[in-house]
Every structure is written in C-alpha cells, then in structure tokens.
Amino acid sequence: MTGVLISIFVLGYVAIAFENSIKINKSAIALITGTLCWTAYILLSANKELVSDELQQHLGSLSGILFFLLGAMTIVELIDAHDGFDIITSAIHQTDQRKLLWVVGLITFFLSSILDNLTTTIVMVSLLGKLIRNDKDRLFFAGIVVIAANAGGAWTPIGDVTTTMLWMGGQITTLNIMAKLFIPSVLSMIIPLIFLSFIIKGRAERPNVKVDKNQTLPRNHKTIVFLSGVSVLVLVPVFKTATHLPPYMGMLLGLGILWVITEIMHGKKNEDEKYALSVVQALRKIDTASILFFLGILVSIAALQSAGILTSIASWMTTTIQNENIIVVSIGLLSSIVDNVPLVAATQGMYSLAQYPTDHYFWEFLAYCAGTGGSILIIGSAAGVAAMGMEKINFFWYLKKISLLALLGYFAGVFAYVMQNYILG
C-alpha cells in the first residue's frame, strides 16, 4: 500500500510541476491525485469503514481551511471592487523596485505576524497587482511575499497554523516563542531580500487605471469597506482566542458582517450598480480553481497521513538520525514537499511534554523550521499555493529563481537560532 500511495503522490506532484509542458491545469491534476490516493488506500485496506471515517474526519478539518480561504479571498475581492486598496497604494510612492521590494517584504512580514501567512499572502498579492504592471517583475515580488509571509507567521502563535498547533498543544507559550524566533525569522526573510536586491532593477510602472463607474464611489465608502475588511481579517485570531472556535468561523462571521455593511451602503443604488459592488459578484470573481487545487493537495497529504506514511517517516528519522537539530531541520525541509501540518501533528504525537517540556528548545526550533521550510518550494506552504494560484506562478520558475534564496534564508535562521540558544541558553 505504501508504495502505491507514494507512487500516486509523486506522479501527481511531477505532473503539477510540469503543468506548462503537459498543458493540463494543476487543479485538475491535484483533484485526480487526491481522489486516487484515497481510492487506492480504501481498496488496499481491510477495514473499509475505518478509511471512510478517516476521510470524513479529514474533510472536517480541510473544509475549515477551504472556507477560511474562500472567506478571505472574497473579502479581499470586495475591498478591491470598492478600490479600497487605493488607500495603501496611494500611500506607497516608492517606484524604485529595489526599495519597493523591501517595503513589500517588511509590510508582509509584520502583517503576517498579526493576521496569518495565508490571509497576508492573499492581501499582499492583490496589492502587487495595483503596484507593478510588469508580470515578470511582479513574480519576484510574489516570491518574496511567500517567503516573508511564512517567516512573519513563524514567530507568533497566530501567524502560522503549525505555530498555533504547538501553542494550543501546550508545547510553546506566547511571549517566549516571540522572543526566541524573532531574529531567526527576520534573517530568513532578509537574506533573500538582500540577494533579490541585486537581481531586481529599474523602476516599477503602475498598471493603467481603468475608468469605470466604480471610480465615482465616494471616498468615505472606499474607506469604510477597506477599514471594515481589514478589521475583520485582523480580528479573526482574536475571535478564535476568545471563543475557541476554529478560525474559519471568525472569517465567515466577518464576511457576513461586511456583506450587511455593503448591502446597507448600496441599498439605494440601481440593481446593476449594486450587483457590481456586492459580495455575490465578489464570489463570482474569486479564483475557485485555486481553491480546488488547494483541496486536491490537502486531500492527497491527508491520505499519506492516514496511511501512517508520514508518521513512519518521522519515526525512521528519529531512530536513524538521533540528533535533535538534524531531525528538526529535516522536518522543515520535508515540509517544502508535503504539508507542514501533518508533519507537526505527527511530531507532537511522537514526543511528549514529559520528554520535551513546554518552551523546550526542540519545540521552538520545530516552530521555526516547520513554519519557514515550506517557502523552499512554491507548493510547500498554504501561502505558496495561494500565490501560485493568484499569480499563475510556474513551479519550475519558482524553483529556479526563488527556491535557492529561500533555502539560504532558511539556513541563516537555523544558524541564528542554534547560536542564539548556545549563547543565551
């Protein structure tokens, strides 16, 4: 069974990587791969009911991620329909691409620590479309957004789902993880930024502004929708902490509130004007194919997790490597290929708090490596998958132009954390 599942996953992975060559959309490949993984798993399993129950359990958690993504993308699209992002883009006057790269990177890094890496990526990639006209140049900026979003998410409990898992599991505490991972996370972003500063040249040309009826919107309407949308995104982690409900519930609540606000705001307009600025239209404009691609990837990983393959890999690493640093660094590198959530979940199941107490070196290091290692490949993190779908980033383009820089940043952070612990204890 293990060989069959791994073969299906690898073939699907390769097909996604060669999307441009085989001329088949990656979303279709991801959906087929995910379905075939579970089909092979249930056919080769003796207990069919158990496999079916496992699939239902995984879909419960996966649907939460998908609804979160759906809500976030709709809110961003609604803000864009009201030209809300003009408030930010008009405040960014920098046109030198090198300096603009640093502005985008730093905004992404700190925004990700407040929101989360997925939401931040959606917001920032949407902003890039307003700031940079050239498609090729914009891809480099999208690459740094992925790196900065993952780096920014790693050092706070609410910035990355794996850090949140460790936080909720009692392996880390808020102030300690922020203090210990800030410098490594900053370095994992700054190193790629420095190298990209030598690659990116010239001035950024803004896209042509299209004159349409939306341009006649009162400025206060733009401001209300922008501030309401951003507030909803920022308050999602607060909602989760206060209610202990999953993040997608806060996102859906926020979307509903913003829906009501816009309905009231445009209630007196004629139907055509109202429709163009409605949530219904925003839902039509979001990239549904990207959500399906995300679903296919997550379902595939869930099959490998349920079959015990990921746990077996983690166990093999423990018994074979027998070195904490190498094990954690390897988990981070592995998270660039498979999702970091099941990897961290498997690690939490393998090591107890009795063995590694709260705020132990092992858990802190795991939070950094699992959070930033996914940047090495474009499909190694939720942020990367979202950017890939929104900007149509080719797997091999990212591998050739961004992966090495992300890898250098990853190891710079690894070195910083190890030395920091050695010096400060």
Image (cartoon, rainbow, N blue to C red):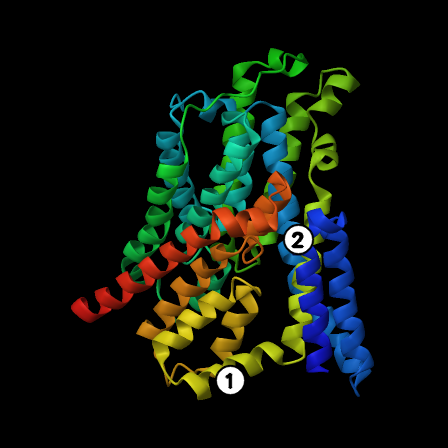
Label 2 vs label 1: CA separation? Answer: 30 Å
Which residue is at the front of the view, 330 or 110? 330
What x and y, as percent, mark residue 405? 41, 51
Numbered tag placed on residue 389 in the rendering: none
30 lies above or below 270: below
User: Quarter of the image containing the N terminus?
Assistant: bottom right
What x and y, as percent, mark residue 286? 69, 38
Q: Residue at x 64, y 44 (%)?
A: 389
Q: Dot 1 surroundings within 10 Å: few (below 14), some, or many (20 or more)?
A: some
Q: Is mark 1 on a helix, strand or loop?
A: helix
Res. 416 image quadrant: bottom left
Which mark is first along the chain, 1 or 2? 2
Q: Is mark 2 on a helix, strand or loop?
A: helix
Q: Which amino acid does label 1 sit on?
A: Ser
Which residue is at the front of the view, 42 or 86? 42
Res. 157 image quadrant: bottom left
In the drawing, does residue 125 fall left or right of residue 59? left
User: Quarter of the image containing the C terminus?
Assistant: bottom left
Would residue 155 be visible to someone looking at this image? no
322 lies above or below 237: below
In the drawing, does residue 322 fall left or right of residue 394? left
| Circle 2 or circle 1, nearest the eye | 1
Q: What residue type is labelled 2?
A: Leu
What x and y, as percent, mark residue 149? 45, 48
What x and y, as percent, mark residue 155? 37, 56
Asked if labels 1 and 2 touch by Cβ distance under 8 angstroms, the answer is: no
Q: Name the residue under label 1.
A: 315
Q: Which residue is drawn at 51% across and 40% down?
A: 142
Q: Mark 2 points at which residue?
A: 66
In the drawing, does residue 389 fall left or right of residue 114? right
